[in-house]
Amino acid sequence: MDWGTELWDQYDIIEKHTQSGLELVEKYVKFVKERTEIEQNYAKQLRNLSKKYNLKRGNKDEPECRFSSFQSFLDILNEMNDYAGQRELIAENMMMNICIDLTKYLQELKQERKTYLSEAKKAQQSLESTYKQLDNSKKRFEREWREAERAAQYAEKTDQDINATKADVEKAKQQAHMRAHVAEECKNDYAAQLQKYNKEQNQFYFNDMPLIFNKLQDMDEKRVRKLAEGYILFSDTEKHVMPIIGKCLEGVTKAGTNVNERNDSMTVIEQNKSGFERPGDLEFEDYSQGINRASSDSSLGTPKGPMDLLGKNRSKNFWLFSKKSKPTVTEDFAHLPPEQRRKRLQQKLEEIGKELQKEVDQSEALGKMKDVYEKNPQMGDPASLASQISQTSQNIERLRGELSKYETWLAEAGGRGDTLRYRTHTFNNNGAHDVYSPDGAHSDESTPDASQAIYAEFDDDFEEEELTAPIGKCTAMYNFPGASEGTIAMQEGEVLAVVEEDKGDGWTRVRRNNGDEGYIPTSYVTITLNK
């Protein structure tokens, strides 16, 4: 069954139905657009929420960061950030695959419908024009036939009139004959116009309009099928990211299972253990025996009570839960309990050691550069490095002093620091550099004579500094095209080096073995960081 056969006389209904179909497509496009706006706002709110509760960069060394419960909370925030990225992807895909595609298709449908309706109107106008010609020929035939009848009646009357001359009779007969001939021509013309109209009417109702109606039916059915595909895409778009969303939710679950209450308790002990012994029993001071209180006090060789242990004023009572005033922070951390003081001193020594090693490496690099400039003046002026060399030497001496000072304090606190192994350069007046060991002993270090060796050493040293050392590795769980600027493509199962962690925006910077670097979605990979 088709519209051309069954709805041959329902032009207005078909026109209204097809217009209603186009309006439904427009309505669905608007619906999906509003849905994408909801998804984008939801993703934005999730990202802001994760950012709000995440640690600032300067707070990552806070004591609570070592608790598994706190780390798991941070993992949940990261997973929520990745989850927000998937909601953004849903919105983007819906906009591209449904809204934009259907909007373009809708414009094509409107143009196609306009063409078919225009053809129908032209056919209708052509039939109406033919009908007007038929009506005119019919009216002319009617008019001329009546005139012919009157002429014939007048001729007959004149022929019977005895007073009429022969010339009058002949004239009346000629007039009647002429009118009859004109009426006959009009009759033939009317018959021809009628035949033409019936033929065109038959063509209109059995060929032209059914063909146009069937085209409109095909167009409408394609519109319905395209709309149905849009309905399916509405679901499939979200289903496509469900595995990744599932991974995010699994990450949240894993964060919960990674919480270890026992380890957190041990961390509290490690961070806050004072190292003090519990107060001993107070001795009985028998004033009845004449014991001098001052001599009794001075005879105490070891702390007996909390006032001795904590260095408090003896006139004040010691209470475990008493409100304590905030201690004055000192450079040697003497305001801290013994155990915490040792840890802070060791931590400070490590920081100074790293900074010192950095300055030592800088000194060695400047020494190599100066050697190259001296042997190859075209590459640079050795004197231009003097200020940097001097500043580096001052920094090394300053850090040496701080290192020695903190090692002394650590020894006083009952701890032992590891001796930092490093080499540093001093520069003589001739521009040559001497190497000293940590204990100050001098050792000679020969310099290769060949200029090529100098170039190789110089270049290798600085080429190594250009590339950031990987902080871990990752394995791709899904394919990623890497079509956007700054991204890099990857295949499922591919292993890449992690150069930079996710900063909270859902992207991780990675590097291939060939040196190619770029960003990939964090949720597309499993990451293992170096310990």
Image (cartoon, helix red, strand yellow):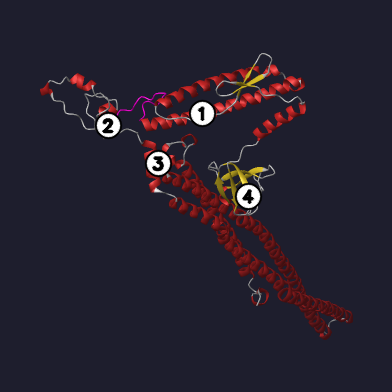
Image point 32% across, 32% down: which residue?
A: 276
Residue 13, quarter of the rendered image: bottom right
Give, as a single range, the part of the protein colored magenta. 323-337
Residue flagged by tag 2: what amino acid is it? Answer: Lys
What mark, if any, has residue 495 been given in the picture? 4
Image point 42% across, 37% down: which residue?
A: 63
- Judge the density around disc 3: few (<14), some (14-19), many (≥20) Cα neighbours within 10 Å: some
Foreground pick, 380 / 314 = 314
Magenta run includes residue 324: yes
What mark, if any, has residue 267 been given in the picture? 3
Q: Is residue 211 visible?
A: yes
For mark 2, give the secondary structure: loop
Residue 214 in the figure: left or right of residue 278: right
Q: Position of residue 284 (x, y in %)?
A: 16, 28
For mark 4, give the secondary structure: strand
Q: Nearer the viewer, mark 1 or mark 2?
A: 1
Identify residue for label 1: 419
Q: Earlier in the sequence, mark 1 or mark 2?
A: 2
Please, is residue 45 above or below residue 244 in the view?
above
For mark 3, give the secondary structure: helix
Foreground pick, 470 / 341 = 341
Q: Nearer the viewer, mark 3 or mark 2?
A: 3
Identify residue for label 2: 323
Q: Position of residue 126 (x, y in %)?
A: 75, 68
Q: Assess whether mark 2 and mark 4 are in contact (beta carbons under 8 angstroms).
A: no
Image point 47% across, 48% down: which residue?
A: 76
Distance Cα–Cα, label 1 vs label 2 = 40 Å
